[in-house]
Amino acid sequence: MNPEKARFNMLEQQIRPWRVVDADVLGLLSLVKREEFVPAERRAFAFADIQMPLGFGAAMLTPKVEAQILQALKVRKNEKVLEVGTGSGYMAALLAAHADHVWSVEIVPELAAKARENLERRHIANVSVETGDGMTGLPAHGPFDVIVVSGGVSDVPKELLAQLKVGGRLFAIVGTAPRMTAQVTTRATEDGFRSVGLFETEAALLCNGSAKQGFVF
């Protein structure tokens, strides 16, 4: 595999056709090497339009969905970010490039350890990987400007919404396969939330992501 050619093809054949036009996002996807966060035995498929299995029932989102997340959230340098579901650490690395600090929570200890290794190897210092149930958030470090749920949930957990700053944005893929919607929820006021559906997709439910514990809009 020629990784640079494969990366170019990923950008031109998968991501741009999915209406990702933000130059910062496209540049970031060229800069952060996706293949370095994929299990070694699956590296030949690092740029494929698939959810990449990581073991333990976890998977990386497809490249075009990762790109859509970055474009929709527009993370800024002064912002604190929470990610639920670290996986390989790739999305945390992408978010960290534009954030002040990223806290990422992974429920599987083995995946958390591997993500830390991947991030340390790339000298990404503004990501903290915590082991635990991200569905309850990290109140000790909140509130957050941005929350990314890197996988599927049946509903947006109310605990996460409570840890979002006013003006903050939360991304999640919500619903039950095969009908799931990628959406961004903005906290408009202390008590008011506004959700916008971005596109239909499908993602494996995160651990504890199927509990009906969502906020009623």
Image: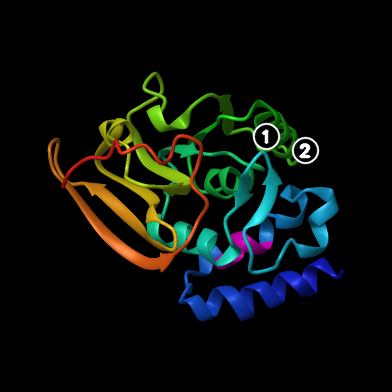
Q: Nearer the viewer, residue 90 or 150?
A: 150
The residue depicted at 27 percent of the width and 40 percent of the height is 214
Local crowd size for mark 1, using a 10 Å CA cut-off: few (<14), some (14–19), many (≥20): many
Q: Is residue 55 magenta?
A: no
Q: Position of residue 192 (x, y in %)?
A: 13, 43
Q: Nearer the viewer, residue 41 or 146?
A: 41
Q: Give the quarter of the figure containing the N terminus.
A: bottom right
Q: Is residue 217 left or right of residue 119?
A: left
Residue identifier under label 2: 121
Figure quadrant of residue 198: bottom left
Q: Position of residue 84 (x, y in %)?
A: 48, 38
Q: State the residue lying farthest toward the top.
A: 140
Local crowd size for mark 2, using a 10 Å CA cut-off: few (<14), some (14–19), many (≥20): few
Figure quadrant of residue 47: bottom right
Chief SS of the magenta region: helix
Secondary structure, mark 2, is helix
Q: Is residue 90 left or right of residue 6?
A: left
Q: Position of residue 171 (x, y in %)?
A: 38, 50
Q: Amino acid at mark 1?
A: Leu
Q: Nearer the viewer, residue 23 or 37?
A: 37
Given this view, does label 2 or label 1 mark the residue nearer the observer? 1
Indicate whether 74 appears above or below 214: below
The residue depicted at 73 percent of the width and 34 percent of the height is 114
Q: Indicate which disc residue 111 carries.
A: 1
Indicate whether 146 appears above or below 174: above
Q: Position of residue 50 (x, y in %)?
A: 64, 64
Q: Amino acid at mark 2?
A: Arg
Magenta span: 26-30
- Whichever of labels 2 and 1 marks the residue nearer the N terminus, that label is 1
